[in-house]
Amino acid sequence: MGFREDVSIRVIPDSEGARVDIRSSSRYFEHDLGSNAARIAKFSEDMNEVVDNARPAKKSLVPAAKAQVKGAPKR
């Protein structure tokens, strides 16, 4: 129906990784018939899937400030 809703996502680092707090609320109505909870559950499932399937980042042996972009002229 096009009603606007507010979603807030806060990521807080902790000793094991990070904690994610998610809040969703309707701007116009006190009751949402479960749509906010469904939105948070879907986002949480999608985020967990991405994290579970993520590959560890490869560390570069060259410091980022000195890394050369392929095809860029050397200075």
Image: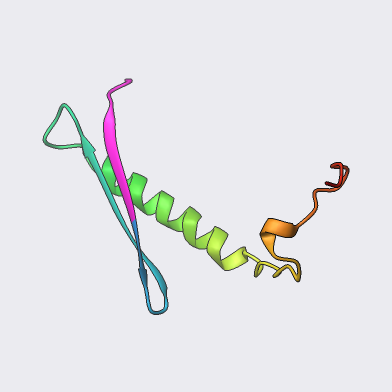
Q: Position of residue 54 (x, y in %)?
A: 62, 64
Specify whether residue 17 is painted magenta: no
Say left or right for 72 vs 11: right
Tell me what residue is drawn at x 18 percent, y 30 percent. Answer: 27
Determine the residue positioned at 27% across, 36% down.
Answer: 6
Q: Nearer the viewer, residue 7 or 69?
A: 69
> In terms of image quadrants, where is residue 39?
top left
Q: Position of residue 53 (x, y in %)?
A: 62, 64
Camera-nearest residue between 74 and 60? 74
Which residue lies most toward the top here? 1
10 above or below 8?
below
Residue lying farthest to the front in this orientation: 75
Q: Position of residue 22 (x, y in %)?
A: 30, 52
The image shows residue 52, relative to residue 44, as above or below, that is below
Quadrant in which the N terminus is drawn: top left
- The stretch of residues the image draws in magenta is 1-10
| Residue at 39% over, 68% down | 18
